Amino acid sequence: MHRCLLIAEIFSSIVSFSESSYSKTDLYNLALTCKAFSEIALDELWSDVDDFMALVYLLPAELWHGTNSDASECCMTRETVPSDWTRFLVHARRVKALTYQTLWEYRIKAIKPPWNTEVFKSNTVLQHLHQQCPLPNLLPRLRALIWRIVDTEILPLFICPSLQSLSFGSTVHRPATLEVMEASAHLLTSLDLQDYDPDMHDVSPELVNRACTLIKRMERLRSFQTTFAIRSDAMAHLARLPKLGQLVVLLAGDHTDHTAINLPSRPLFPSLSSLVVRSSNFMPFTSFLSAISSKSLGTMRWVTDNGNPDGLLKVSDVLSKHPSLGALRSLAIRMHGDFGVDAPATLEAFRPLLKLKNLTHLEMSIPSLYVTNEDLKEIASNLPNLFLLKLGEGSDFPPRVTLSGLAALFHHCKLQFLDITVDATEALPAEEFHVPSNYPDHAWTNSDRLQFLNLFNSPISPSKVEDIALFLNEFFPNLVALGAWNDALTDVYADPREEEPSSRDLWEQAAAKYAELRALFKHRYADDDGTGWHGFNQ
């Protein structure tokens, strides 16, 4: 073993950095390797727990009667004694994050003294253990608690002085949730009130207002997320938090309510660095965006169900004049629905965004987005730092971008991710399937960087499969994945004869030929939950 691994700081960094690559079994085996690795590996193994019963079963086996199988009920057989807690306390101190879901699936029941008279509800197990635990808190160093069940009776058992992050699923409407928020207001740096139960949205304004009244006391709060609609009176509390850096909100208001976000004229959200907003209309969002004073807003995502080119233009104009103009690195705009056949979203609808010179990630998920080869040239020349570019998710309009048109992007950008719809049909002239002869050397170097190409519902002709494979081989030699939709894509533009292959089949053929030409990848495709496929993997 290399002696560097005996240095605790180095080995700890390796394990922490590689956390996503390790399974629980890997960490367990690593802990059994030697004493030098044991403590650090165990710290990592127990740092994030999503099954609290794993801790409960650290108590002695003779404390329980039965098993945790579906065919048996497990019962406590006696009171605990101090020696019963030895293993539990050793590992409970390691837990930094807990996701609490349920105990019922383990069929745990506790029995009141004298242990053979009355059966408790399962939650009473933890209440009983909490009373007997030698420490005041079951998890004394817990920092993050994710609560995924409706029952909040035992929620206070996990609140401790080290707690920094709270996340609630379907319990925002429960009084106990607000009580816990109040008790931990001075501790929290992160709060997540995302409730996806549609039945709760009718009462959400009152609940969120009550929550925000508590939130104004959370001066340490750095991140706040909610799926409830936020109005002016509640937003004002959030806007004054001095350290709030990440915000995920649903804005109240629509085209009939222009005053939904009417914040006072003072510097608001001074430390905001990441913003995710969902709104029914662009009006409340533009009002809200204009009120933000932060000059360090680096990431922004806007989702709307009622978008149109005029609204997109107004939002783009506000962004192009925002104080954080130079700081913005990542921008995503997702519009659901359809602008209509007569009103596609062209480059004119978001040209002001081209002033955001430092963008590295740009995502425009708009069904009716309509761009041309010339538009790509303008986008690339104005946004040379782009690393990821997503333009549309397929459209009702035949695409105007061609394969050769993609070449313009790499005159300026060093893209590694590109999502776009192209025209690859036989109606195009042959030169559209070839790289321009005067293509500069630096652009060849840039195009070599592209690894992920998603072509959505791009139309393709059988006669062009070979040409496409040759183009990809020459222009994008380092692709790791090529994606497209699963459906018979040509149906979007025409009604193909049944005997003709679908566009998906043709793109798979092009991917296979590309893999053969490269001789670097093993061709393989697979359905991805019904949404797409990946052409090849290393």
Image (tube, rainbow, N blue to C red):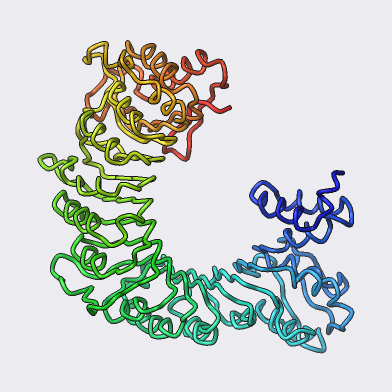
Asked whether 134 or 387 is in front, the reply is 387
Q: Is residue 53 above or below residue 28?
A: below
Q: Is residue 171 above or below residue 515?
A: below
Asked whether 350 or 293 is in front, the reply is 293
As drawn, is 455 to the left or to the right of 185? left
Q: Is residue 121 above or below residue 101?
A: below
Q: Residue placed farthest to the left in the image?
A: 342
Q: Quadrant of the N terminus?
A: top right
Q: Quadrant of residue 314?
A: bottom left
Counting from the top left corner in percent of width and height, residue 234 is at 32, 80
Q: Quadrant of the C terminus?
A: top right
Q: Quadrant of residue 384?
A: top left
- The number of numbered discs placed on residues in the rendered structure image is 0
What residue do we see at 82% from left, 61% from top? 39
Asked whether 472 or 385 is in front, the reply is 385
What residue do we see at 51% from left, 18% from top? 515
Q: Quadrant of residue 97?
A: bottom right
As drawn, is 243 to the left or to the right of 267? right
Q: Is residue 113 above or below residue 165?
A: below
Counting from the top left corner in percent of width and height, residue 421 is at 30, 31
What residue do we see at 47% from left, 85% from top? 175
What residue do we see at 87% from left, 50% from top? 33
Counting from the top left corner in percent of width and height, residue 190 is at 50, 71
Counting from the top left corner in percent of width and height, residue 105 is at 65, 65
